[in-house]
Image: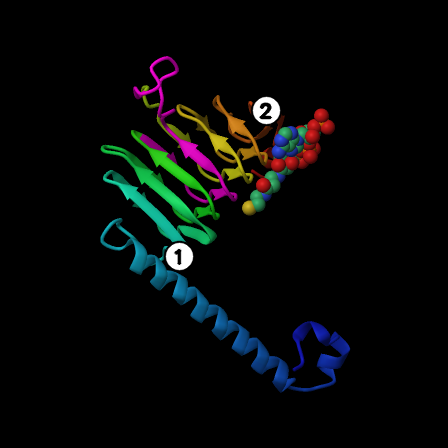
């Protein structure tokens, strides 16, 4: 079968309608649409009735929901739970909110006893952990410490294997390097990384594109 990339422009132009190329392109486009529909149906099957799930939410693979709190998903939210499921845990009175068109990659786990709010157009890399409670008091291990709501503002990109701890706010358009442990607020429009995460630089490129 002839693939698009196998043909040079000269070869394409030498074949007036390049019918095989066109058919291949149409089949690829159809296959893409069918797969996409599958992800939309998968989201409805696995989430509907438990979470208000707009028809634009997509789920590849599996998601594990537990707890009796509230999960609110925006339009176009997309989960990849193929290799390892995505986990959303809401304890009583906990709330997880995920903004429009945010993408969450496999193995990620988000747990809210009070509130975890993730903005729109964010990207969460593989195995991102977000929690608004440490779960164990430092002295009395069997007691629950206070929760500290977590806010991740719009257009934040979080690298793989990052841990975001209670009470943290990450400003819009910030980038968090892979493997970071975020213990304090991160300002908007900067790159932060490390354990504990520190600001590496400000994204001055964004100022120019404004
Ligand atoms: C943070 C990142 C985006 C690079 O940003 P950058 O501004 O181009 O940073 P640089 O590569 O110039 O590195 C600047 C400094 O930060 C350090 N640094 C970069 N990434 C780091 C990380 N994740 N953790 C700790 N330090 C890091 C570098 O070692 C360098 O230190 P130095 O100045 O002492 O040499 C990139 O390193 C990263 O972590 N990408 C995430 C990839 C990922 O997880 N993708 C998700 C797939 S779904």
Q: How is the image coloured?
A: rainbow
Using the numbered discs, state the Cα–Cα distance from disc 2 to disc 1 in whole angstroms: 33 Å
Residue annotated with mark 2: 199
Q: Main secondary structure of the magenta part?
A: loop
User: Helix, strand, or loop for circle 1?
Assistant: strand
**Of residues 16 and 55, the one drawn nearer to the viewer in this rendering:** 55
Position of residue 107 measured from the top left corner of the image (x, y, whole percent): 47, 45
**Of residues 181 and 173, the one drawn nearer to the viewer in this rendering:** 181
Region rendered in magenta: 115-144
Residue 40 seen in render: yes
Residue 130 within the segment the image draws in magenta: yes
The quarter of the displayed image where residue 48 is located = bottom left
Q: Is residue 3 above or below residue 189?
A: below
On-image quarter of the C terminus: top right
Where ligand 1 lies, by quadrant?
A: top right
**Residue placed at 43% from the left, 71% from the top?**
34
Answer with left or right where residue 207 lies relative to residue 120.
right
User: Helix, strand, or loop for circle 2?
Assistant: strand
Residue annotated with mark 1: 58
**Residue placed at 42% from the left, 34% from the top?**
130
Residue 204 seen in render: no
* Residue count near mark 1 (Cα–Cα under 10 Å), binned few <14, some 14–19, many ≥20: many
């Amino acid at each position: 079968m002839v693939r698009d990339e196998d043909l040079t422009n000269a070869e394409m132009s030498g074949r007036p309608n390049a019918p095989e190329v066109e058919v291949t392109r149409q089949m690829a486009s159809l296959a893409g649409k069918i797969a996409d529909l599958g992800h939309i149906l998968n989201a409805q099957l696995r989430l509907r009735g438990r979470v208000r799930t707009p028809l634009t939410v997509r789920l590849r693979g599996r998601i594990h929901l537990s707890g009796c709190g509230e999960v609110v998903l925006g339009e176009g939210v997309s989960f990849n739970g193929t290799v390892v499921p995505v986990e959303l845990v809401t304890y009583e009175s906990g709330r997880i909110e995920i903004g429009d068109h945010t993408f969450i990659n496999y193995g990620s786990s988000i747990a809210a006893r009070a509130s975890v709010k993730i903005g729109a157009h964010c990207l969460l890399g593989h195995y991102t952990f977000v929690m608004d409670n440490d779960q164990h008091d430092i002295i009395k291990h069997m007691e629950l410490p206070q929760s500290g709501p977590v806010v991740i503002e719009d257009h934040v990109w979080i690298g793989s294997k990052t841990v975001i701890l209670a009470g943290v706010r990450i400003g819009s358009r910030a980038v968090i390097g892979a493997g970071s442990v975020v213990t304090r607020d991160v300002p908007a429009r900067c790159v932060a990384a490390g354990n504990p995460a520190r600001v590496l630089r400000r994204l001055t490129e964004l100022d120019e594109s404004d």
